Image (tube, rainbow, N blue to C red):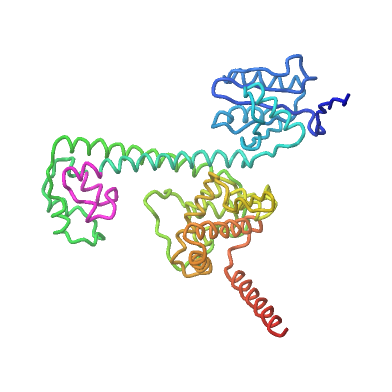
């Protein structure tokens, strides 16, 4: 009789014997430790703070040193902070990297699977900036949400004006600017004279006062005036909230250490176009604070302004040594093509779908380089002719990411002549190669 095949379980060597796995949910958390550490190696804990501290005490009792958990929503943040304060090495891993084999799925099996992958060394920790940068990042993201909510009230103001046939947006570039707010306040105070309302405009408004007065003749219905009043009050409420966030941001930025010992103020701008402060820019000197913290002027890079530079610093900090090189940094941002090959055939060469605020900021900066008269502007236009608009934005954002990594790593100011010299060398090598081929 033929011998029956014996199922042999292949076991990987254990690299982290003191590892635990955590499956996080909104109401309960499942934790798995090695089977030899406790008689009940899998336990369930509620998500209250007292229970999270009990979870940390149990891990300490089981002599656990490192913990792995998925980045599930924002539920992982309280536990991550408590475990870090207790001295555990916490691995925050991407959920894509801990996929289990198809079959029955439960919270118990998930935490055991995470614990197994972590103990055999198959998990990589996601990038997380220092605690002080995380605090600034939270405030900056909250500020972005406040700006979005204020813009909704601006749209409500616009709708109320349209319903009363007040064409202010046709004669003013911004209805929430200095002139627009004065006109809106006068309308809510009961002033209906279009000529008197037109005289409230600032002297820099280029539209003639007669046309402004003509645009202010409308049908003032009480219900629309009431809607305008509430919308304007909501807009000003969020503007006050943004101002308070700016004060808190400035306080956190001042607490960060200096990176420059010599020059305290940023160097003069080298960009030909003067930067004009926008309506939602912070009230304090953001460029000066960023230069003091980073040690180099990031706004000198084409396509990067003060808000983009602050988004970069608040998301990744000033230390990029966690990334091996510029290629790893660009790959983390999702700006590199992910080449998938099977059976000798290329199946996929597009970029990974990544939600990254730094990548979005660099894409916006690359999109603004279409009319730029510099090396990156020429590169964007060349890629647009060759690849198309979308691919050109990604390629230019990838180049911006490499420049940004080099500037943050070496603390050297942006110098465009380096790219021109490399292009000239590449052209010379191509000419030499063609001459050799022609001589054969």
Residue 273, how many percent across, how many down? Answer: 43, 66
Q: Quadrant of residue 243?
A: top left
- Residue at the limit of the structure toward the bottom, as seen here: 439
User: Looking at the rendering, in which quadrant would you find the C terminus?
Assistant: bottom right
Q: Is residue 207 left or right of residue 113?
A: left
Residue located 28% across and 55% down the image: 173
274 vs 292, nearest the viewer:
274
Q: Quadrant of residue 135?
A: top right
Indicate yes or no whether the magenta region holds residue 181. Answer: yes
Residue 177, how many percent across, how many down? Answer: 29, 50
Q: Is residue 349 left or right of residue 286?
A: right
Where 436 sits versus 357, above or below? Answer: below
Where 102 sits versus 316, above or below? Answer: above
Residue 295, how many percent across, how many down? Answer: 60, 56
Which region of the structure is painted magenta? 158-184
Indicate yes or no whether the magenta region holds residue 393. Answer: no
Q: Main secondary structure of the magenta part?
A: helix
Q: Is residue 235 left or right of residue 423?
A: left
Residue 75, how many percent across, how many down? Answer: 56, 28
Residue located 25% across and 49% down the image: 180
Where 342 sits versus 89, above or below? Answer: below
- Residue at the limit of the structure toward the top, as seen here: 39
Say how many tags the image has: 0
333 vs 56, nearest the viewer:
333
Where 264 sits versus 425, above or below? Answer: above
User: Looking at the rendering, in which quadrant would you find the N terminus?
Assistant: top right
Residue located 71% across and 85% down the image: 439
């Amino acid at each position: 009789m033929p011998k029956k095949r014996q199922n042999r379980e292949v076991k990987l060597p254990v690299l982290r014997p003191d590892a635990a796995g955590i499956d996080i949910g909104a109401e309960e958390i499942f934790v798995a430790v090695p089977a030899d550490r406790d008689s009940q190696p899998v336990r369930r804990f509620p998500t209250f703070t007292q229970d999270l501290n009990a979870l940390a005490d149990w891990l300490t009792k089981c002599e656990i040193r490192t913990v792995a958990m998925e980045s599930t929503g924002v539920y992982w943040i309280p536990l991550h902070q408590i475990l870090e304060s207790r001295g555990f090495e916490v691995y925050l891993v991407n959920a894509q990297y801990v996929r289990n084999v198809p079959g029955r799925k439960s919270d118990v099996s998930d935490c055991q699977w995470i614990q197994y992958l972590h103990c055999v060394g198959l998990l990589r920790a996601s990038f997380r900036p220092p605690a002080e940068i995380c605090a600034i990042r939270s405030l900056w993201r909250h500020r972005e949400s406040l700006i979005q909510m204020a813009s909704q009230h601006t749209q409500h103001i616009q709708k109320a004006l349209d319903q009363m046939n007040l064409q202010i947006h046709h004669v003013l570039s911004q209805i929430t600017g200095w002139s627009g707010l004065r006109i809106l306040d006068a309308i809510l105070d009961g002033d209906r004279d279009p000529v008197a309302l037109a005289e409230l405009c600032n002297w820099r408004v280029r539209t003639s006062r007669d046309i402004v007065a003509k645009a202010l003749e409308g049908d003032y219905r009480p219900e629309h005036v009431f809607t305008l009043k509430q919308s304007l009050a909501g807009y000003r409420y969020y503007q006050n909230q943004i101002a308070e966030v700016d004060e808190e941001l400035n306080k956190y930025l001042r607490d960060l250490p200096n990176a420059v010992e010599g020059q305290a103020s940023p160097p003069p701008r080298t960009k030909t176009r003067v930067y004009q402060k926008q309506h939602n820019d912070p009230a304090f000197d953001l460029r000066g604070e960023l230069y003091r913290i980073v040690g180099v002027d990031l706004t000198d890079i084409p396509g990067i302004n003060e808000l983009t530079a602050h988004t970069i610093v608040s998301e990744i900090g000033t230390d990029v040594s966690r990334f091996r090189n510029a290629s790893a940094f660009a790959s983390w941002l999702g700006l590199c093509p992910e080449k998938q090959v099977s059976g000798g055939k290329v199946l996929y060469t597009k970029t990974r779908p990544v939600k990254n605020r730094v990548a979005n900021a660099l894409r916006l900066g690359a999109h603004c380089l279409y009319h730029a008269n510099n090396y990156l502007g020429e590169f964007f236009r060349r890629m647009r002719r060759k690849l198309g608009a979308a691919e050109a934005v990604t390629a230019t954002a990838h180049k911006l990411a490499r420049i940004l990594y080099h500037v943050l790593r070496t603390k050297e100011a942006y110098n465009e002549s380096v790219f021109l010299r490399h292009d000239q060398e590449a052209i010379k090598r191509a000419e030499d190669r063609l001459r050799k081929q022609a001589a054969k």
